[in-house]
Amino acid sequence: MSLAIRERLVPFSLPATDGSVVSADQLADRPVLSVAFWCNHCPYVKAWEDRLIALQREYAPRGVQLIMINSNDPAAYPDDSFEAMQIRAREKSYPFPYLFDASQAVARQFGATRTPEIFLFDADRTLRYHGAPDDNFEDPGSVGHHFLRDAIDALLAGREPATATTPPKGCTIKWKK
Amino acid sequence: MRIEFLYWEECPSHPDALARLRHVLRDEGIPDKVDVIRVDTQEDADRHRFPGSPTIRINGVDLQPEGVQGQALLTCRTYRTENGRLSPLPTVTMIREALRADRPMTKEEPHESRHS
């Protein structure tokens, strides 16, 4: 069961690819926080990756913070190891923290099941949008509904996001056996 | 023409990919005799040399052989499309070109080369 709309952010503190440790508390001043369950190997992540990088760069001046968390079992999926995450973050010049949830506890607390899967929180850190980044993973030029972008715009404007939930579309999180 | 469609249930791209394959077969006038193979275990993946879901083989040749790397694995597969994008699905164009490359050439229907 995933976090429900209006539920509070689950606190976390996880190692990032740049060697730091990032906790939700450190980002308390950000008006909008997006936590995305993410990984290296999934083609859905790869399909949306450049769009979320661009979104972070565009909205950073307005205080919006995206955070990516990889909870996959690297024993089964070596492409999702911490070392591979570091390489990916460097290669793509990630403008957001990329965190490793080695115990998978954070994914379980959020109730995440897919990569990518977005949990968007407002300034009070209540969940206001949960689901997919947009409605077309294949072609950025053919997106009809920019769910995440529209929800961020709504929160920045003090409005209710028009769409609060969509089905996450992506690979399953690879749980440890 | 032998057409195999291999998939792993856990990866959500396979229904769209199979529908896309069948759509192209109809368009091309090729009988829809797809051998749909479900891959459930690592043993299945090893036996079928399964590089990820979905995988389409035409007369035993992978739709995008350059995308087949490493060991067989229960995973979603990444395709590089003709536009250079990365996608969980092969495009209609990729499927069509692969099918045309493997059809016998006739006077009425000159075929195009599959890969440049």
Image (cartoon, rainbow, N blue to C red):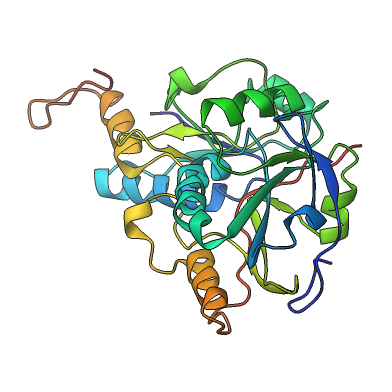
Q: Does the rendering let one see residue B10?
A: no
In the image, residue A137 sits, relative to residue A132, either above or below, namely above
Q: Out of B79 and A144, give the one closest to the viewer.
A: A144
The reply, left or right, for residue B47 in relation to residue B102 is right
Residue B16 percent coordinates (x, y): 49, 52
Residue under the image location 75 percent in, 36 percent down: A16
What is the total number of numbered labels drawn onto the structure image? 0
Q: Out of B92 and A107, give the one closest to the viewer.
A: A107
Q: Out of B1 and A87, give the one closest to the viewer.
A: A87
**Quadrant position of residue B104:** top left
Residue A165 percent coordinates (x, y): 63, 73
In the image, residue B7 sits, relative to residue B105, either above or below, namely below
Q: Residue furthest top?
A: B70
Q: Does the rendering let one see residue B24?
A: yes
Residue under the image location 67 percent in, 42 percent down: A97
Residue B76 percent coordinates (x, y): 61, 38
Q: In which quadrant of the rendered image does the N terminus of chain B lie? A: top left
The reply, left or right, for residue B77 in relation to residue B89 is right
Q: In which quadrant of the rendered image does the C terminus of chain B lie? A: top left
Residue under the image location 51 percent in, 43 percent down: A49
Residue under the image location 37 percent in, 51 percent down: A139
Residue B13 percent coordinates (x, y): 55, 48
